[in-house]
Amino acid sequence: MQESAVENPYGLGALIQNGDIIARSILLILLIMSLLTWFIMITKFFDQRRQRKQAIETEHRALVSTIDKAVKRGALHRNTGARKKSRAARVAAGKSS
């Protein structure tokens, strides 16, 4: 038995080959808009990643400042404060504590 390839008259290839200028223009516009959408999604992903890192750094600085104040006032022993700052630094760096 011999299998013959059946062409799909409703496919994208048929639309590009047999379509008029309006159909091809619409396909081109859709392609451009799709590419722009992917560009926006990727740039937003990197912006959110950068903002998340900045927020973690800000929270870490505030935590270290609070620990230093507690050590200075005598509420925490200096070794306990150093241990807590070290653990906070590991968490901020993304390593498990």
Image: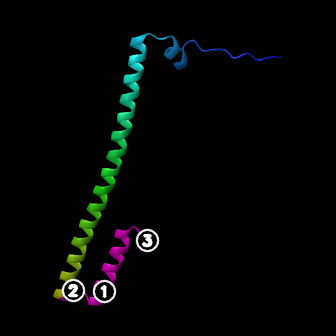
Disc 1: which residue: 80
CB contact under 8 Å: marks 1 and 2: yes
Q: Position of residue 75 (x, y in %)?
A: 21, 86
Three-letter amino acid code at the position of disc 2:
Val
User: Can you give x and y, in whole percent of width and height, for residue 5 in the image?
Assistant: 69, 17
Q: Which residues are magenta?
A: 74-97
How busy is the neighbourhood of tag 3: few (under 14 within 10 Å), some, or many (20 plus)? few
Residue nearest the observer in this picture, 21 or 45: 21
Q: Residues within 10 Å of mark 2 (few under 14, many from 20)?
A: some
Crowd tier of the residue under label 1, counting other residues whose Cα lies within 10 Å: few below 14, some 14–19, many 20 or above: few
Question: Which residue is at 30% across, 56% downward?
Answer: 50
Tell me the distance, in whole angstroms, between the alpha carbons under discs 3 and 2.
25 Å
In the picture, measured across the screen, residue 34 lies left or right of residue 70, that is right
Query: Mark 3 — residue?
Result: 96
N-term mark: 1 or 2: 2
Would you say the magenta stretch is mainly helix, strand or loop? helix
Foreground pick, 33 / 97 = 33
Q: Residue furthest left?
A: 73
- Amino acid on which the number 1 mark rests in the picture: Thr
Residue 71, labelled with which disc?
2
